[in-house]
Amino acid sequence: MASITLRNVDKVYAGGVQAVRNVSLDVADGELVVLVGPSGCGKSTLLRMIAGLESITGGEIRIGERRVNELEPAERDIAMVFQNYALYPHMTVFDNLAYGLRNRGVPRAEIDRRVDEAARLLEIEPFLARKPRALSGGQRQRVAMGRAIVREPQAFLFDEPLSNLDAKLRNQMRIEIRQLQRRLGTTSVYVTHDQLEAMTLADLLVVMNKGEVEQVGPPLDVYERPASVFVAGFIGAPAMNLIEAKAVNGRLTAGSGALDLPAPAGVDTVRVGVRPEHLHFGSADGAGLTLGLTVDAIEPVGAETYLHGHLDGSPRTTLIVRVAGKSLIPPGTRIDTHAAAGDVHLFDIATGKRLPD
Amino acid sequence: MIERSHLGNVLAHLILIIGVVIICFPVYVAVIGSTHDATTIANGNMPLVPGGHFLENYYRILFEGTKSTTREPVATMLLNSLIMAMMIAVGKIAISLLSAYAIVYFRFRFRMVAFWVIFITLMLPVEVRIYPTYKVIADLHMLDTYTGLTLPLIASATATLLFRQFFMTVPDELVEASKIDGAGPVKFFFDTLLPLSRTTMAALFVILFIYGWNQYLWPILITTRDDMQTIVIGIKKMLAVVDALTEWQLVMATAVLAMLPPVVVVVAMQNLFIKGLTETEK
């Protein structure tokens, strides 16, 4: 087991495209770090740089105490789980697990022991003699995990390992990965574009955008205090409501008075963010946020209902309110909502960064 | 499948049967012809029922040769053809695998140039470069050798391109998984790429074996001794006899014999062959 340290890591492709820009990150021993972001944000590139599958243009990557910039993937003592599993199709499950160990000259008895142990852990013992072709998606996923486990590496690298599974299996495997990683205590870096997966798996969440790190922190911290408009919009489903507002006479206002909130000193225009679940019916007492909206559509999802609407006086500012249980409000209804001052986020219009509270 | 009318079925089968008859009839005639004696065929009425000279004809052609032209027995020619076809097929597959591997998996200077050079040789079949090739082989004293017979035919691009196409469909993640599993380029080639190419290799082997077996122009140039002749040339030479009757029954027996090895190869590798041309699962 080892920590992973990234210092000012850059990746520039041959064509001049900068995929990763000045990323620094500390992954503590035994921690599960999730890199999350939209496609093309550089998260996979970063993971592949840690694995040694992509060269490092600038900066330094350390696994444990070793600088690994110049090391081959096999020398870095990491194991990787790929999105499409990348099992060797012509080998049995046993051989798939044993291949990396054989290449490293691990004695036969030791290979048998480790493969048996991993197979027991992942409950793939009945399939050891089969070829990957004869396995279901979930079973292949387990074999891919097994191939990583038997190596007993310094770190696991997961590259969107659940993307090819159906929703139900994905939820189940997500929990299994979490339990397995806890049990083995192996440092892990996990890449996903699914914010729910990211929230539930991570010890430490790294939100990336356009090759740069937007925010690093425990998942709930990131959720509760997003550092930028991008993070606010990306983490959480349905997404946070973001409304541009102007300061007039010490009050922030938008949509000809439909939005009302005390303005912090020295602020002119600002982006106001509030999560759909923090909007409650009724008006605020003056300290919090008041928001008047007209409901356009209703999305009942069972345990809760999403009201889609727009800010009064500003039809293009769409809003979502999350209501527990069923809601019988017909579309077209005008409603008043409010949110507590502590649930309101303010972001700089120009930079998108969070304003100090 | 949509339910088809009875008439449509009959029609389809009729057309297929006609096709089979058209293809099989000449073969049937050759087989029948090889069981008669010379005079029966020479009198102009091609018999359609087997005659009584089957064993005699095949024994003569295999081990004694034709009477009037004192040709070599066909057994030697069969062996020569077999060696040539095998060397061409195996050689081509080996060379093509390696060059395709280099072109697909390694980043080196002039990689695309190398690819295009190989590609361009596709446009230059043996017939076009036959004089310089002959000169080279002659100067290397390789006339009347198996090496001379096969080497110029081994170096060509078709198989390289086919393997290149196949390698490009192998997912990159397999290479990456191999790298992480500690397998270098050589190990990856033998442990993963070769087993995956098995069906492609089989399909190519069938095609190349028949290609090699049917070679005519190059062997006729490069072989001068009778004991280096291939069977295709043997048939041709049997037809051209001076001041005597062509022994058609023996020519047909030779043709039948010449047909057998390719048939055996196709039948034996049929399953792999079809998989190699159609399989998509990686």
Image: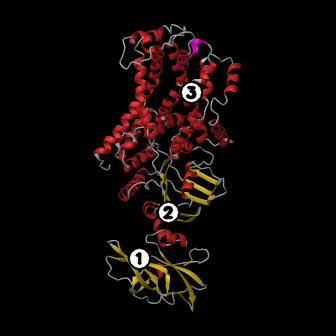
* Position above or below: B39 against B96: above
Work out whether residue B133 or residue B38 is closer to the camera in this orientation and state it: B38
Q: Position of residue B163 (x, y in %)?
A: 54, 38
In magenta stretch: residue A243: no
Residue at 54% across, 58% down: A43
Chain assignment, label 2: A
Q: Position of residue A159 (x, y in %)?
A: 49, 53
In magenta stretch: residue B226: yes
Contact? badges 1 and 3 (CB < 8 Å): no
Q: Position of residue B49 (x, y in %)?
A: 35, 18
The alpha-carbon separation of the residues under discs 2 and 3 comes to 55 Å
Label 1 and label 3 in one chain: no
**On the rendered image, what quadrant is the C terminus of chain A found in?**
bottom right
Work out whether residue A70 or residue B92 is closer to the camera in this orientation and state it: B92
Q: Which residue is mark 3?
A: B91
Residue at 56% across, 90% down: A250
- The region drawn magenta spans B225-231
Left or right: A349 as drawn, with respect to B39? right
Of badges 1 and 3, nearer the viewer stands 3
The alpha-carbon separation of the residues under discs 1 and 3 comes to 71 Å
SS state under label 3: helix
Q: Residues within 10 Å of mark 3 (few under 14, many from 20)?
A: some
Q: What is the number of the mark on residue A205?
A: 2
Label 1 and label 2 in one chain: yes
Determine which quarter of the picture holds residue B57.
top left
Q: Which residue is mark 1?
A: A277
The alpha-carbon separation of the residues under discs 1 and 2 comes to 22 Å
Contact? badges 1 and 2 (CB < 8 Å): no
Q: Amino acid at mark 3?
A: Gly
